[in-house]
Amino acid sequence: MNNTAFNISEKSGGARKNWQSLRTDGFPIITIIIATYNVEKFLPQTIRSIREQSYPYVQLIIADGDSKDGTIELLKQNEDCIDFWFSEKDKGIYDAWNKALRYIQGDWVIFLGAGDEFASNKALDQIAPYLSRAFPEHELVFGNAIFVSKEKSVVIEKKERSWSEMKGKWVFFRPELPDHATVFQHKSMFTSAEPFNTNYLIAGDTEFLLRSLKRKEPYYCPVDVSKVLYGGLSATLNNFWNMYKEICRINKDLEINPPFVHWLVTITKLILKLLFYKMLPKNAANKVLDMCRVVQGLQKRWSVE
């Protein structure tokens, strides 16, 4: 348990519960961390989803990057649900996560994005028994992700793959991984000052998971954990080239070598995507890319509103 004193300032607040007195044998405390910046449009649905959870042992920490819209007011209005929030300039999402980790009181930690939601109000109730028996054999526990469109929350696809189904597979130049918004990390993983490498602006969570999986395999639970907004930082087509460069750096640092065929096919797809966006208006490019996905027997992704 982290005993770091809370950073009390005008731009901080929250319920600050006494988690030692609330701790109950057999019921892990789950810490949820959200990094925010000018997200007053999307954050309410995430807070509402957390507020509606039937599982009672939930600590919510929000690390805001000095928002200029109505995000701060929103945080103040929900202090009964937020255990601790603070707002100050940061160097990106992974810097914000590192700062928030100083205040965790939970046994397990999950990171959500503003706009993400839990799959149901029973999601944490359903995952808690798995968390209770996972450690120390497993440091990572994950479940299923439901990807939804950013504007209308239309379901795009569902990822429900066990670790045995992912292991040995390759996605975008690196080994396939669970979606971070469905992954619960044991508190023992956050003993260093900066668990997330802030030199990565897009793929810091990928680097963290890959590094962690070199130690122990994760524990898969057949539970729908999160509804994830498609179109986050690393999923935006405009960021794909930067993502590629960061993945290459991670592979070099962790001595990961993707198969040549995978690299060739994926780099060809990436270049074609970038060309579509250079030559066509965004909406037209999205439709063309989804036509290509349908031909391959995949669901539409880019043109779904």
Image: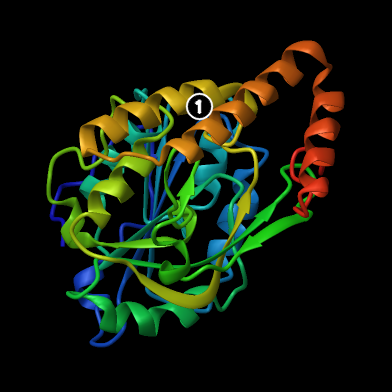
> Residue 3: image x %, image y %?
13, 55
> Residue 193: image x %, image y %?
14, 39
- Residue reaching furthest top? 279
Q: Amino acid at mark 1?
A: Ser
Residue 68 seen in the figure? no
Q: Dot 1, how many residues are within 10 Å of its Cα: few (below 14), some (14-19), or many (20+)?
A: some
Residue 109 image-quadrant placement: bottom left
> Residue 205: image x %, image y %?
37, 42
Q: Residue at x 87, y 25 (%)?
A: 284
> Residue 285: image x %, image y %?
81, 25
Q: In the rendered image, which quarter contains the N terminus?
A: bottom left
Residue picked out by circle 1: 67
Name the one closer to the observer, 102 or 169: 169
Q: Is residue 203 left or right of residue 281?
A: left
Q: Is residue 285 left or right of residue 11?
A: right
Q: Is residue 190 left or right of residue 153?
A: left
Secondary structure state at the residue bearing disc 1: loop
Vertical placement of 13 versus 242: above or below?
A: below
Residue 155 image-quadrant placement: bottom right
Q: In the rendered image, which quarter contains the C terminus?
A: top right
- Residue reaching furthest front? 261
Q: Residue at x 61, y 59 (%)?
A: 48
Q: Is residue 196 left or right of residue 61?
A: left
Name the one closer to the observer, 161 or 87: 161
Vertical placement of 213 versus 255: above or below?
A: below
Name the one closer to the observer, 90 or 264: 264
